[in-house]
Image (spheres, rainbow, N blue to C red):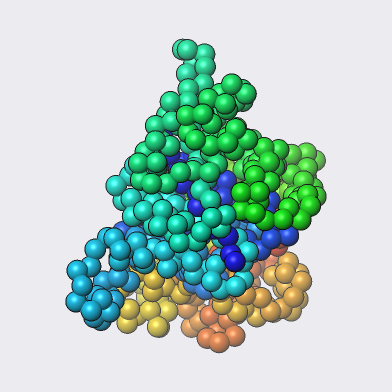
Amino acid sequence: MTKYIFVTGGVTSSLGKGIISASLAKLLQARGYRVTIQKFDPYINIDPGTLNPYEHGECYVTEDGAETDLDLGHYERFLNVPTSQANNITTGRIYQNVINKEREGAYLGKTVQVVPHITDEIKRNMKILGESGNFDIVITELGGTVGDIESLPYVEAVRQLRWELGQNNSLVIHLTLVPYLAAAGELKTKPTQHSVKLLLEYGVQPDILVCRTEHHLSAEIRKKVALFCNVERNAVIESIDASTIYDVPLLMRKENLDGIVLKKLKLASKGEPDLESWKDFLGRLKNPTAEVKIGLVGKYVELPDAYKSINEAFIHAGAKNECKVRVKCIHSESITAENVNEKLAGLDGVLVAPGFGSRGIEGKIEAIKYIRENQIPFFGICLGMQCSVIEFGRNVLGLKDAHSTEMNPDTKNAVISMMEEQKKIKNKGGTMRLGSYACDIKKGTKAASIYGKTKIAERHRHRYEFNNAFLNQYEKAGMIASGINPENNLVEIVELKDHPYFVAVQFHPELKSTVANPHPLFVNFVAAALAHSHKK
């Protein structure tokens, strides 16, 4: 029987439930168990696809085309196992399913209520992955904080499901905060006590407490927390601030979190977890032999989570190259023809990031022009690729009004235009070109040497594409379409012939970069930046 672990949060948000969930999953996976993680988000949006990145960070896209919470990126990066639509459920989707059933007459005239209908739908979704037969353990992270009004149905569903699953088939891990008061010079456990008390009021007794802290928990504090929160002394786990999220699995192993979980779920330990490759990655990450400075030109740079997967992919690629990657975020709205030299000075490479809308577009185009003319390694992703096509059209082909119809519907030289199948779509949610699509790479190109093969599949999230009416004109001038979708001839990768490293892609390679498999485009881009640094 599949075992279920529920991870809740208390006191405050942003304590790192996703990292704790991913770290525990990594430890259990390293012991030989088949593990997956799912995230339940309490907002009413059907998915985060229509949310501004300033609202909720980046939108993470799965292989099957689901627009999901960024925590699923952590799950994949730690476990090296793809997630799917079933791994991220929102309140919006729960209510949509229930209301659809009500309209179909599925409830036989009954009054539809939060209990039992909404909680039943939550429980059904909580069990989908476990009932697939593909996993030994399913970890379910509940978004938000215990006490939030929107989280109540999820906590109630956990209470019911634990009773239904029976003893030793589930447990609850509650992540809380033990703050340090500098004026008093001590750690305070009262917020944790109140958080657990609130959870108890809802009928849920946590089995394990993971305490986020800036200072080590003394034996006396652990004993006090255990006493007042009704948990075993060894089930009070310290989660001290770490220099990198990739330290957390080892810190949790030191606290024996995985061992306690296995004991409470009555599962065999299967020996010590095999973490040698993880330790090797950390060794290379923390002991670089070189350093590069890469500019990230984007329009949401004020919020680091807006480019979470890109930043993590740079960490993976840096470790692979035994190189420290220092990312300098540059707001594209701040870049002009007059100051571009100053803004990009001293960089060893530049990545122009994805995005939507016209804001900051001209700054991205100016940055690409400077990069192309000054032979600086360049990497463009999604809108970054489209901007590179626009820049090349304007400044090399002489198409002065070259643009995307997203920004200028009336341009005579629409080098980027809306995909045909997108023109009839009116609803915005979940209707982009989403998920994994095939790409054929031309032999002898830089892309072919990077991937080491000619057939790949990458994840997408866009409505606009390279206009193939201009393709011959571009290729004659030196911008090669080195990657093409075999089904509809969509240009997926462009590169410049006479440039040390100028590669831009329509897809999102950052979404497939993991600790175990750093993405080759990021690995080679960092290597090119390192070569440029040495040349300087």
Q: Nearer the viewer, residue 473 or 7?
A: 7
Q: Position of residue 296 (x, y in %)?
A: 55, 49
Q: Nearer the viewer, residue 282 or 31?
A: 31
**Which image quarter: residue 52?**
bottom left
Q: Position of residue 416 (x, y in %)?
A: 45, 73
Q: Position of residue 403 (x, y in %)?
A: 42, 68
Image quadrant containing the C terminus: top right
In the displayed structure, does residue 186 sit left or right of residue 513?
A: left
Image height check: is 504 above or below 25?
below
**Which image quarter: residue 255?**
top right
In the displayed structure, does residue 532 sit left or right of residue 146?
A: right
Q: Residue at x 60, y 73 (%)?
A: 133
Q: Position of residue 89 (x, y in %)?
A: 42, 63
Q: Residue at x 50, y 81 (%)?
A: 468
Residue 64 seen in the figure: yes
Residue 323 seen in the figure: no
Q: Residue at x 53, y 51 (%)?
A: 171
Image height check: is 363 above or below 84?
above
